[in-house]
């Protein structure tokens, strides 16, 4: 019998698991895919927002600002990439300039520091590649960028080392309420738990409907992105947003923590919760709108495009509360700024759990986690030390990103390790570069095949299972 | 200890041929740096035949061609280090030495120094992302070369029902290869109105097996949430834009992309070498020397070849010239004449010629911009015609190799222009 | 009767035109730039042959590249591949070593095209 079962190993589920592991609780995370961070958390803008955007008084506003304040310390303790690169919101039409002032006022109301409005020329001085059409901008110094996968994995690994169980490839198929709590039916057997946290992303409505007759609406909103080569990564240093206009919500252009340039997302509500396909129209829209903000974006240097689905709730705010069913807590509708808010959402969820179960501090909680050693981040002496100890670090597998065999083996062998090509890619960046795994995938596949004891052609690309595949495999 | 006369980056066909030639020209103090665990580079996975007709006067497979060169390297006692990746090349600010930083399990991260460097890193495939094909990103989409490596070197069985986008040679070769491995290849779609592969490969890889080649077609959508389920192929117009309502669905579990090769010049750029935007390779002189003196480039890292025999020949020249450089025998006293690609010619290698440093026979290699029938290739300097050669057909997939004698070039003083002229004009 | 074909003997891929009489005899070949083109046209129009390249499985589990030492009749390609696939090659093997003798009764041996330890 678990005290808490978290459904969904995205950033919210993993952050909640980590937070709950600070207390003497038996916690489990059930995830339908074979890896953590396979849904909304992996495909988004990777921004830790400053918090000036959300309406005053909303959970989004409160938790975003809090999350942003927590992030620096967390990144240090849990060893994930995070950089406060600052952001700008661009205004292209003099008539819209008052909207910048409104945003500045909202920032102040939300408790966001380091926000100011500048003229178009001042903006271009700060970011020389900005379009000549920019007539004013809001500058926010506390906005940041993060590697969302590394962050989710850091939360998950920290939770794991503090005793949380992870059940991957485990699809929740039904939930029965009983006097002690819940019996949760999954594709891999039943799980008993006193409390459930529903962090199932775009599927949160389906999970909710397994216990409650009250409606909870989640709409998947598709967002398409283009990722460009590192050669383009220094075009802007800040995250560049656009003020929403009558032409619709804007597109952002941002450097990533790894030095690439990212543009997107489009916003299109769809029905299919698995439809992460890109479209020609969507990618064309990204290009056209991104070009309004920043001059000379080298779209010839696109290395990949992808689509993420945001889980948009029907209330306009995050839905984080105990539902009408006692012990069943929703963490639903976590759209933007969900990534930014995740650690604060986790604390908030913990307080709700505390209203149901007694929270007793876990004195053995380990507050730090060591990530995969990224070879390129080391000094030459450290590199040589490492190669002497582990010759596998002297062998480059991914040429484009200079990832060594040692790192790939670490990604595969560590607890909650990678079992797919994408899993290795997100942990080590092998295959994330300009050749997009053309050269390294056969080597990576053979390392995974060896570890899992399977044939090379049976190594999967990603941890995502379609219903069909699940049936084929089981 | 870590000082060399010549470091050769890459132990594929280019690097090996350059090393053999440099050694023959008297450079004993040289080293080949190869990132793979064997010499031979991409040839090891090119198990088909068709290599070596020029070099060895017989038709060899890729591994045979590679092994012959590897044997020459070994017989001549040329040192090589495997599983060794070059991380950076830099010209020393206060001397003509070049610093080459390498990593291997044996050396760790170490900087080697050399008077001359030959860049022979080869090329890579254009990935799906760069092609901007919309749709899902499922398992089962590979670049043709990656699939070739998986099938031929790892023994993987990657699919049963195959569609190939792009009619580059690797794509055509893989169409036959997958067929012989028991798969069914439904079609090869090519965006352009002509194939970018060799004619012989269309005959013996597609026609022999009844595989249709769909010219002016492209993949417009990829279906399958985790495993590839099929692709939509549509016709394209003269501007290569898909034509509405011409989409046709091809169920498949494998999509191979053979959509072009890109010289791999990150090290070159890092070394401060000037890049020719038309080839994405270094801009070089008659001696295959880049804009940085003592740094040479050859093979597919310089410009993508269709024949390994041309790679070997070109690379041998790079090796000879590197030897000359090391022996201080490159004559820089004469004029430097630009070689310009004009009508119908996309680029030329070299892009400049030092008239005092000519060889008895000098090559100008280029590709044409489109398909030309019954034309003349003309090389002129000012009003002086240096060469005129009739050709029945010229296609972009086939590199043209012109040879100009030293006496023709020695005395010229105006830019060399290479262009295609309609016959009868 | 006139037949058009593309020579596959080398990467030049010459366009050949052959005059063929009613019995299928090749009377003349034009368009070729060397003697091999003429020979190719004659053989292609009467008894087409191909060199087959593929991989055989070594006892290490990894593939070894192989080829038919001489071209074989085109219609025998799949049969020859089946024979190769049914074999296991004992390592080590040297480039040029025969791994299958007289494959599918073509009279042609299959040889390794790479030395594998």
Image: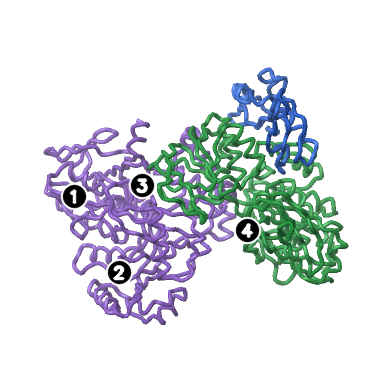
Chain colours: A purple, B green, C blue
How much space separates mark 2 and mark 4, taking CA atoms? Answer: 41 Å
Marks 2, 4: nearer the viewer:
2
The answer to which image quadrant residue A99 occupies is bottom left
Q: Are marks 4 and 1 on the same chain?
A: no
The quadrant of the rendering that contains the N terminus of chain A is top left
- Circle 4 — which element? loop
Q: Chain of mark 2?
A: A
**What residue is disc 4 on?**
B265
How much space separates mark 3 and mark 2, taking CA atoms? Answer: 33 Å
Marks 3, 2: nearer the viewer:
2
The quadrant of the rendering that contains the C terminus of chain A is top left
Q: Residues within 10 Å of mark 3 (few under 14, many from 20)?
A: many
* 3 and 2 marks in contact (CB < 8 Å): no
Marks 4, 1: nearer the viewer:
4
Q: Chain of mark 1?
A: A
* 2 and 4 marks in contact (CB < 8 Å): no
Q: Earlier in the sequence, mark 2 or mark 1?
A: 2
**What residue is disc 3 on?**
A36
Q: Chain of mark 3?
A: A
Mark identifier at residue A244: 2
Q: Is there any visible trace of residue A399 in the rendered image?
A: yes
């Amino acid at each position: 019998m678990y005290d808490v079962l978290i459904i969904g190993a995205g950033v919210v589920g993993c952050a909640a698991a980590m937070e709950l592991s600070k207390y003497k609780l038996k916690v489990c995370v059930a995830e339908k895919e074979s890896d953590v961070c396979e849904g909304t958390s992996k495909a988004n803008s990777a921004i830790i927002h400053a918090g000036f955007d959300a309406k005053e008084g909303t959970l989004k506003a409160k938790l975003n600002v809090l999350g942003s304040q927590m992030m620096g310390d967390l990144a240090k303790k849990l060893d994930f990439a995070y950089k406060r690169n600052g952001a700008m919101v661009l205004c292209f039409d003099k008539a819209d300039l008052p909207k910048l002032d409104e945003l500045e006022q909202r920032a102040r109301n939300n408790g966001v520091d380091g926000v100011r409005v500048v003229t178009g020329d001042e903006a271009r001085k700060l970011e020389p590649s900005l379009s000549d059409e920019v007539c004013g901008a809001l500058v926010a110094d506390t906005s940041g960028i993060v590697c969302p996968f590394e962050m989710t994995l850091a939360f998950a690994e920290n939770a794991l080392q503090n005793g949380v169980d992870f059940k991957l490839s485990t699809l929740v198929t039904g939930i029965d309420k009983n006097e002690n709590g819940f019996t949760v039916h999954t594709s891999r057997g039943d799980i008993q738990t006193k409390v459930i946290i529903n962090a199932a992303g775009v599927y949160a409505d389906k999970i909710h409907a397994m216990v409650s007759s009250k409606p909870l609406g989640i709409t998947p909103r598709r967002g398409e992105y283009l990722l460009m080569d590192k050669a383009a990564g220094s075009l802007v240093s800040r995250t560049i947003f656009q003020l929403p206009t009558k032409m619709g919500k804007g597109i952002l252009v941002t450097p990533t923590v790894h030095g690439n340039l990212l543009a997107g997302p489009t916003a299109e509500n769809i029905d299919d919760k698995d439809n992460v396909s890109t479209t020609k129209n969507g990618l064309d829209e990204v290009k056209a709108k991104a070009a309004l903000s920043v001059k000379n974006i080298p779209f010839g240097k696109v290395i990949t495009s992808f689509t993420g689905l945001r889980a948009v709730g029907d209330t306009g705010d995050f839905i984080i509360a105990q539902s009408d069913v006692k012990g069943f807590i929703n963490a639903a509708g976590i759209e933007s700024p969900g990534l930014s808010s995740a650690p604060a959402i986790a604390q908030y969820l913990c307080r709700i759990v505390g209203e149901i179960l007694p929270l007793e501090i876990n004195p053995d909680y380990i507050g730090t986690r060591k990530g995969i050693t990224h070879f390129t981040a080391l000094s030459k002496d450290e590199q040589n030390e490492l190669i002497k100890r582990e010759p596998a670090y002297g062998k480059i597998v991914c040429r484009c990103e200079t990832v060594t065999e040692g790192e790939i083996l670490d990604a595969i062998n560590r607890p909650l390790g990678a079992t797919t090509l994408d899993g290795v890619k997100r942990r080590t960046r092998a295959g994330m570069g300009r050749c997009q795994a053309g050269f390294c995938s056969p080597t990576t596949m053979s390392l995974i095949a060896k570890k899992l004891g399977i044939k090379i052609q049976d190594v999967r690309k990603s941890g995502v299972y379609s219903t069909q595949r699940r049936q084929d495999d089981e | 200890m870590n000082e060399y006369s010549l470091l050769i980056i890459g132990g594929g066909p280019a690097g090996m041929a350059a090393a053999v030639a440099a050694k023959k020209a008297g450079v004993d103090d040289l080293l080949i740096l190869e990132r793979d665990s064997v010499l031979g580079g991409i040839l090891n996975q090119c198990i088909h035949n068709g290599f070596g007709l020029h070099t060895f006067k017989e038709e060899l497979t890729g591994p045979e061609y590679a092994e012959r060169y590897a044997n020459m390297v070994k017989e001549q006692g040329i040192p090589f280090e495997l599983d060794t990746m070059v991380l950076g090349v830099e010209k020393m600010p206060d001397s003509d030495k070049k610093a080459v930083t390498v990593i291997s399990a044996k050396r760790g991260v170490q900087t080697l120094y050399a008077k001359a460097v030959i860049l022979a890193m080869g090329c890579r495939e254009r990935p799906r992302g760069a092609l901007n094909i919309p749709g899902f990103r499922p398992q089962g989409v590979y670049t043709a070369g990656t699939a070739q490596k998986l099938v031929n070197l790892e023994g993987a069985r990657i699919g049963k029902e195959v569609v190939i986008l792009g009619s580059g040679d690797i794509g055509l070769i893989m169409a036959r290869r997958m067929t012989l491995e028991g798969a069914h290849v439904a079609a090869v779609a090519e965006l352009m109105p002509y194939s970018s592969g060799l004619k012989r490969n269309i005959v013996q890889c597609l026609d022999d097996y009844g595989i249709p080649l769909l010219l002016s077609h492209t993949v417009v959508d990829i279906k399958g949430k985790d495993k590839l389920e099929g692709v939509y192929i549509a016709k394209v117009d003269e501007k290569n834009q898909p034509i509405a309502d011409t989409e046709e669905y091809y169920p498949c579990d494998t999509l191979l992309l053979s959509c072009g090769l890109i010289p791999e010049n990150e090290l070159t750029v890092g070394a401060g070498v000037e890049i020719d935007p038309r080839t994405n390779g270094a801009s070089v002189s008659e001696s295959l020397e880049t804009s940085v003196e003592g740094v040479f480039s050859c093979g597919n890292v310089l410009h993508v070849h269709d024949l390994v025999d041309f790679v070997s020949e070109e690379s041998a020249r790079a090796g000879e010239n590197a030897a000359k450089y090391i022996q201080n025998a490159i004559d820089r006293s004469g004029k430097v004449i630009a070689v310009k690609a004009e009508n119908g010619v996309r680029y030329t290698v070299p892009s400049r010629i030092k008239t005092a440093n000519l060889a008895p026979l000098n090559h100008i290699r280029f590709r044409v911009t489109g398909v030309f029938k019954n034309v003349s290739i003309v090389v002129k300097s000012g009003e002086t015609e240096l060469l005129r050669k009739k050709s029945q057909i010229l296609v972009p997939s086939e590199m043209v190799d012109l040879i100009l004698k030293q006496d023709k070039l020695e005395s010229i003083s105006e830019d060399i222009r290479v262009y295609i002229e309609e016959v009868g004009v | 009767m006139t037949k058009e074909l593309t020579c596959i003997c080398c990467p030049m891929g010459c366009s050949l035109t052959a005059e063929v009489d009613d019995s299928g005899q090749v009377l003349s070949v034009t368009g070729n730039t060397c003697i091999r083109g003429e020979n190719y046209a004659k053989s292609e129009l009467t008894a087409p042959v191909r060199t087959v390249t593929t991989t055989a499985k070594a006892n290490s589990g990894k593939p070894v590249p192989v080829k038919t030492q001489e071209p074989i009749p085109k219609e025998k390609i799949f049969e020859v591949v089946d024979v190769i696939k049914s074999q296991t090659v004992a390592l080590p093997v040297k480039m040029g070593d025969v791994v299958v003798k007289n494959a599918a009764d073509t009279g042609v041996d299959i040889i390794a095209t790479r030395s594998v330890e």
